[in-house]
Image (cartoon, rainbow, N blue to C red):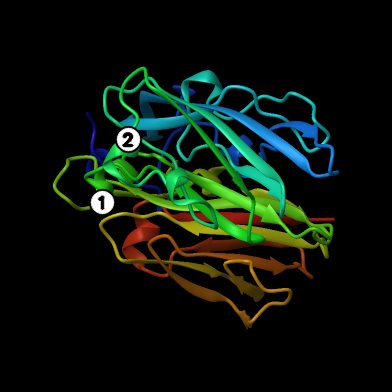
Amino acid sequence: MSNMGDMDMKPDMAVVGECTSGTLDPDLFLTHFDWGKQTKLPDGSTRREYDFVTYDKEIEIAPGVFFPAWAYTSLTPHDKEGNPIEGPGGVTGHVPGPTIRCVEGDTIVINYTNQSDHPHTLHFHGFHHADMDGSMKDQFVYKNGTFKYEFTAEPFGLHLYHCHSVPLKRHIHKGLYGTYIVDPKEGVTPAKEFVMVMNGFDTNFDGGNEVYALNSVAHHHMRHPIVVKKDEPIRLYVVNVTEFDPINSFHLHANFFYENRTGTSKKAEYFTDTIMLCQGERSVLELTFPRLGMYMFHAHQSEFAELGWMGNFLVVE
């Protein structure tokens, strides 16, 4: 297994080369939302059903650097209109896991199967009954086992899900996490939306991260900038699941954004260019770019940026 120190770096600190294994798809993941198989219930509400599986999967997190991950996948992803769509990672799973999206008050049903060699669960941040929490030992799902999670989506906001089997830090660090977005009943204002999960990887298993990334691939958006239009409303769903480091951060160059922590307020609390998030914290950021050009974003811990957590927005007409 290669290690981050073996890789050449460009003068601009971006990793040299491309990931060619196809094990991850950070571009598709960035804008992918799984709305589930939808059924209208007699009371007018919506039932959304997901078929989730956990697999053991080796992923390429930087050119030539592979990590033995545990990954969630959604076997039947659907768009907002109810059409089947392709999910990142295909049927073998992706890190981060699929972004689950729904509306406050929807009934969420997840048919979960564990095909991994280790016991796993799904634990959702938000409101649900204790027997749907996925945190107790008698709720662990062992290899080839199944479990049906069912709960009402609430409150509205930006949440996450992850495995809660033990040791917890290992199960999260190995890749068993994803984003869970609950829209308010009245909907959200139109915007170009991106999911940004800040994560890290301990490639030599010494209890510290050697690689940091956005959506698992180091410096991917340095080589492949995120293209947005001038004056276009942009909404970023930023989630921190970095293990071994208590805090991660997001900093944007030459611009500011409005921050709504956890997305549970009807209006933003802060107008800034840098936020800090503890493990499991998340924020919704809204902004526009009034000028054309290339704008960098990265963790404001310089080590994290140099080891992979850095990218660019390219603003065009």
- Most foreground residue, 70 or 275: 70
Looking at the image, residue 181 lies above or below residue 301: above
Q: Are marks 2 and 1 in contact (CB under 8 Å)?
A: no
Kind of residue at badge 2: Phe
Q: Nearer the viewer, residue 245 or 20?
A: 245
Q: Amino acid at mark 1?
A: Asn
Query: Where in the figure is residue 129, as x and y percent of width and height?
Result: 50, 51
Per the image, the residue denoted by label 1 is 209
Q: Helix, strand or loop at disc 2?
A: loop
In terms of depth relative to the viewer, which is nearer, 191 or 221?
191
Residue pictured at 62% horizontal, 28% vertical = 87
Of the 4 image quadrants, the one containing the C terminus is bottom right
Q: Residue at x 31, y 45 (%)?
A: 136
Residue 203 relative to residue 99: left or right: left
Left or right: 281 with respect to 7?
right
Q: Is residue 302 above or below residue 80?
A: below
Q: For mark 2, does the 10 Å Cα neighbourhood hold few (<14), some (14 to 19), or many (20 or more) residues? A: many
Quadrant of image for the N terminus: top left
Q: Label 2, on which residue? A: 140
Query: What secondary structure is found at the residue carrying circle 1?
Result: loop
